[in-house]
Structure formats: structure tokens, C-alpha cells
Image (spheres, grey):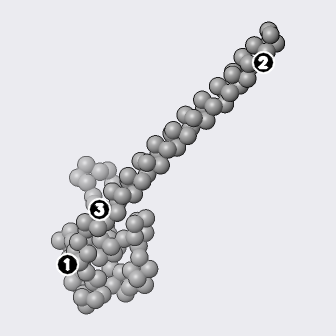
Amino acid sequence: MDTLNTIFVILTGVLLRLIVPLAVTALVVFALHKLDARWQAEAELEKKMLVKDEMPCLKEQGVSGEQLKRRLALDERPCWQTHRLPNGHLREDCLDCEVFHDAPVPAPHKHGHAHV
């Protein structure tokens, strides 16, 4: 009978050493999956809330290089910044657009306290 108790205690210890960490890992995975699903839903909602025509395509508007420079000087965001893909990359249409290629390179802001 003592051997049976010893085997039972060893099996219980082994099961606890395996099942508890697996259960904790499964709970963490489940919680992270739910959190990711919530963030994905929030991102979709935010994307839907954006006004589609907030900044129509500048090429379709026939904006010239000078007009684009004036708009950028007024801190207006160009269409390729407004209509990025969900992963943050630029759209293929924008990469091939002559307005995008002719856009001025943004100049870094200089701070008054910076040492040059």
C-alpha cells in the first residue's frame, strides 16, 4: 500500500508540474488573443470613422507642385499621409504618383536651443 501512495504522490507532483504551467500559459495566450481582438476591432472602428474624402487624391484634383508646396507650408497633410494602409505603409497608387514624386522633401524642424 505504501508503494501505491508513493506512486500516487509522484504522479500528482508530475501532473502539477506539467498542468499548472500549461494552464497558466493557456490563460495568458487566451487573454492576449482577446486583447488583440479588441485592438483589431478598435482599429477597424477608427478606420471606419475616418472621413473617406478628408483629403482626396491630389492627382485627381490636379494639384501642381507649387500648390502642393503652399498646402504643405500650411501644415496640411498630403493625401498619401491620410490614406495609408492599415499597417502604416503607403499605397501602391501613391508610390507611383507623380504628385508624390514631385513633392518637396520635408525639412527637419530646427530648434532654437540646438547646437549646430
Nearest to the observer: residue 77 or residue 46: 46
**Residue position for label 3:** 46
Q: Residues within 10 Å of mark 1 (few under 14, many from 20)?
A: few
Q: Residues within 10 Å of mark 3 (few under 14, many from 20)?
A: few
Nearer the observer, disc 2 or disc 1? 2
Tell me the residue at 27%/83% (across/down).
Answer: 58
**Of pointers 2 and 1, the one earlier in the residue sequence:** 2
Nearest to the observer: residue 45 or residue 13: 13
Does residue 54 lie above or below 113 as drawn?
below
Q: Position of residue 112 (x, y in %)?
A: 23, 52
Classify mark 3: helix, strand or loop: helix
Does residue 70 lie above or below 35 as drawn?
below
Q: Position of residue 29 (x, y in %)?
A: 52, 43
**Residue position for label 2:** 7
Nearer the observer, disc 2 or disc 3? 2
Q: Position of residue 50 (x, y in %)?
A: 25, 68
| Marks 2 and 3 in Cβ contact (< 8 Å) | no
Q: Quadrant of the N terminus?
A: top right
**Residue position for label 1:** 70
